Amino acid sequence: MLNSISPFFTSLFARKDYFFCTLITILGAGIRIYNYDQIPVHNWTADEYAFAWSGMSLIKDHVPTSWSWLKAYGYIPTVDWKNATYQLVTPWLDHPPLFSLIVGSAAILAGANTFYDCTLTSIRIPSLIFGIFAIPLFYRLSLKLCNTKIAIISTLIFATNPNTVFLSRLAVSENLILFLSLVTLLCFLKYCDSSNSTYLYISAFLAGIASLAKITGFFLVPVLCLLLIYRHKLRESLVVFVIGLLLLSIYFIYGSIYDFELFIKILQSHTERFDNFLLFKEIILKPVFFEDGWLTFSWLVLIAVFRSYQDNIKYQIIYIPIIVYSFILLFTGSQSHFYAWYLIPYFPFLFLALGIFWEDFISHPDFLNACLISIFIVGWSFNYSLQYGLGKFWLELSMTKYLFIGCICLLITPFLIHSLIQSQRTKFFASVVALLTMIILFLGNMNIIYSYADKIS
């Protein structure tokens, strides 16, 4: 009997990554689906309807019509719908057509015949699908770059972070860009492992396609070029850049078909919104639905991860996309009219860096990092778990303050003891506390998501 059980456990261990990936994907999917058409609330951003209406009209009338307030269109009479005012323009050329076609198709398949038949229930489905499939893709990317422990931790952060979950439901093109970025980089890694140029061409094609979701999606093209340059593959880098430009040119052809003069004016209107250089304020300090301790702390540990692994070529896949995407946002003036969903393409790379930090913290627990985690993530989780779980008045009670102080003291004590009395026993105990803290924080994430939804709805 023991002989028959042994192969089973050997097989189970060999397939542990499939098991953990599937489990986290199911968890992330359940969290994302719950009240997906209620949170974010209607008209949290009207851009959702802009993409849907553009896609619907492009499919039905072969001319894109949607709302826009860009000055390039001139004065257009407005319409009122569901407590909001819209200026409908034709042709609508604010963004490339790819994501609009996807969302518009979802609306039509759900039975929408006019713009005003659109519902968040239908137009959010594509983003919901992209967000759910991004979870196993992110696990796979983390696994290829690091190891199983880091893949589990990073993907759990990605799957349960409240702001990530809420933003992944929005019908905005950044959700498609995130999905394409993960597939692109996985194909690129396959090319690196196999030297099969087919995978390089696929990754270049996908990177170029991302620019047809939104121009900022073009960031994937220079990311691939830089990764190839670091590998001394200059010719391949040039090929990727040409493929990316050819695909981006489809947007310009698309604009010229309808009204090239108007198209140029629209591009100029986008550049006129440039009025500062303070991108850091938006990407680090900008509240999404509420301030994000996970996201802020990810930016802090990114520097440490970069300094520790800058000579590792694979780790370039973590920080090069962050650097390139930041420059794209900065150069296009996005900081002057920043919206929360611009953060979406950052999430996998920042959370992978945070996963690397957490895994190292659990393996090598120390007092100072325990204090930083308590300040940035534990305090954040405690605050919003109480605020949305029990009610904001609990935060104002004096007993809550003492409860929080007591919890923090209990949390950091094992790490302080280990720093004073370094032994295998104190290290083991501190590592267990670090692991339990992380699990409690993930449960706190889920509590915040479900409680926030119940409070709003």
Image: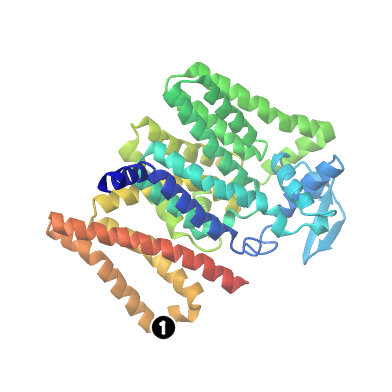
Question: Where, quadrant-wise, is the C terminus in this rendering?
Answer: bottom right
Q: Foreground: 72 or 91?
A: 91
Count of residue discs: 1
From the viewer's perspective, tell me whether residue 146 is left or right of residue 34: left
From the viewer's perspective, tell me whether residue 79 is left or right of residue 103: right
Could you tell me residue 1's position as x and y percent?
28, 48
**Amino acid type shown at disc 1:** Leu
Who's the residue at 43% across and 59% down the image? Answer: 293
Answer with the quarter of the image where residue 86 lies. Answer: bottom right
From the viewer's perspective, tell me whether residue 359 is left or right of residue 231: left
Q: Residue furthest front?
A: 1
Q: Foreground: 148 or 381?
A: 148
Who's the residue at 28% across and 52% down the image? Answer: 361
Could you tell me residue 99's position as x and y percent?
69, 43
Residue 91 seen anywhere in this rendered image of the structure: no
Who's the residue at 39% across and 51% down the image? Answer: 153
Above or below residue 220? Residue 66 is: below
Residue 35 seen anywhere in this rendered image of the structure: yes
Who's the residue at 20% across and 57% down the image? Answer: 428
Above or below residue 423? Residue 214 is: above
Figure colour scheme: rainbow
Q: Foreground: 199 or 260?
A: 199
Which residue has dot 1 on it?
397
Q: Residue furthest top?
A: 235
Above or below residue 130? Residue 396 is: below
Q: Residues within 10 Å of mark 1 (few under 14, many from 20)?
A: few
Could you tell me residue 448's position as x and y percent?
49, 67
